[in-house]
Image (cartoon, rainbow, N blue to C red):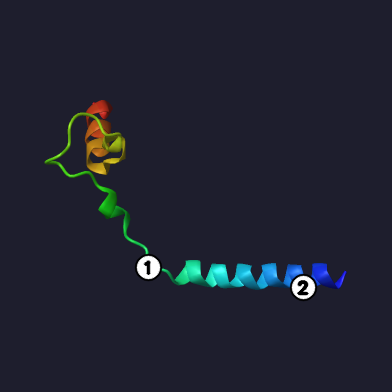
Amino acid sequence: MLGWLTFGGMILVLGILADDWYANRHRKPLSHMKPDPKTLRGFTGMEELDITRANQQIARNKD
């Protein structure tokens, strides 16, 4: 019984440490994932996420 309590306590402490580490680690902004237009060949899948293109299509389809 004492072994399980010790094991559970260790898991709890490791979880708290992991949560603290994850909350404080440096994260890059999503803009670093943008494809480079010079090396771009064909469809990348990012076109659907382009908000300006989406707004243009919405404006075109409203007419």
Tell me which amino acid carries mark 1.
His
Q: Position of residue 53 (x, y in %)?
A: 23, 37
Q: Position of residue 14 (x, y in %)?
A: 62, 70
Contact flag, marks 2 and 1 (Cβ < 8 Å) = no
* Residue at 85% in and 73% down: 2
Tell me which amino acid carries mark 2.
Thr
Residue 35: name its quadrant: top left
Point out the image quarter for the C terminus: top left
Instruction: Give whichever of discs 2 and 1 has the lower sequence position.
Output: 2
Q: Position of residue 51 (x, y in %)?
A: 27, 42
- Foreground residue among 35 and 52: 35
| Residue that badge 2 annotates | 6
| Residue that badge 1 annotates | 26
* Residue at 53% in and 72% down: 20
Point out the image quarter for the N terminus: bottom right
Q: Nearer the viewer, mark 2 or mark 1?
A: 2
50 in relation to 30, above or below: above
User: Which element type, helix, strand or loop, lies under badge 1?
Assistant: loop
Spot the residue most to the front: 3
Structural crowding at the residue carrying mark 2, measured as other residues with C-alpha within 10 Å and reported as few (<14), some (14–19) or many (≥20):
few
Cα–Cα span, label 2 and label 1: 32 Å
- Foreground residue among 6 and 56: 6
